[in-house]
Image: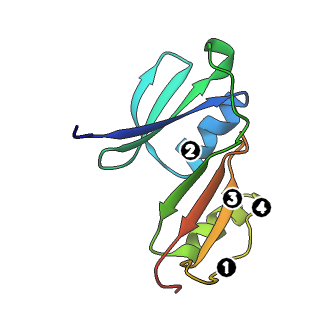
Amino acid sequence: MKILAANTIIYCRKWEATRQFYRDLLQLDVSFQKDDWFIEFSVNGPAHLSIADAAKCTITPGDGAGITLSFFVLDLRAAQATFTGHGIATTEIKAKGWRAPYFYVHDPEGTRIEFWTRNLR
């Protein structure tokens, strides 16, 4: 089996806030949209992240439980400043043990997102 692309789907109670978070704050490009209930964002190459309005789906939202999205960025401090500049809380930047420098933030659905880098600038 050769998997050619990957897509994670988050089922949302807070549809509009989550749409704005990924489209406007993270500035992910929309690669597909189905009416007013499903949006697929391009993360990079064949990796995608989608959101679906739970009110229009048969799948119950997970409210952020049991999943962490992890994104590698070149400038970790700039990424953190993007969130804090919009009043969104993040954890402190940490680099302990085997871990690369990282911080966490949560989207409006409660999904934990890790941002990390190799070398802290």
Q: Secondary structure at mark 4?
A: loop
* Picture residue at 71% right of the left edge, 58% below the top: 86
Q: In the drawing, does residue 35 fall left or right of residue 65? A: left
| Of pointers 2 and 3, the one earlier in the residue sequence | 2
Q: Which residue is mark 3?
A: 105
The amino acid marked with disc number 2 is Tyr
Quarter of the rendering containing residue 29: top left
* Crowd band around label 2 with a 10 angstrom C-alpha radius: few (<14), some (14–19), many (20+): many
The amino acid marked with disc number 1 is Lys
* Crowd band around label 4 with a 10 angstrom C-alpha radius: few (<14), some (14–19), many (20+): few
The reply to whether dot 2 and dot 4 touch (C-beta < 8 Å) is no
Quarter of the rendering containing residue 85: bottom right
- Of tags 1 and 3, the one toward the viewer is 1
Numbered mark located on residue 94 in the image: 1
* Quarter of the figure with the N terminus: top left
Q: Secondary structure at mark 3?
A: strand
Q: Position of residue 83 (x, y in %)?
A: 67, 61
Q: Which residue is mark 4?
A: 89
* Picture residue at 56% right of the left edge, 77% below the top: 99
| Of pointers 1 and 3, the one earlier in the residue sequence | 1
The reply to whether dot 4 and dot 3 touch (C-beta < 8 Å) is yes
3D distance between C-alphas at marks 4 and 1: 15 Å
Q: Position of residue 56 (x, y in %)?
A: 63, 13
Q: Position of residue 94 (x, y in %)?
A: 67, 79
* Picture residue at 44% right of the left edge, 74% below the top: 74
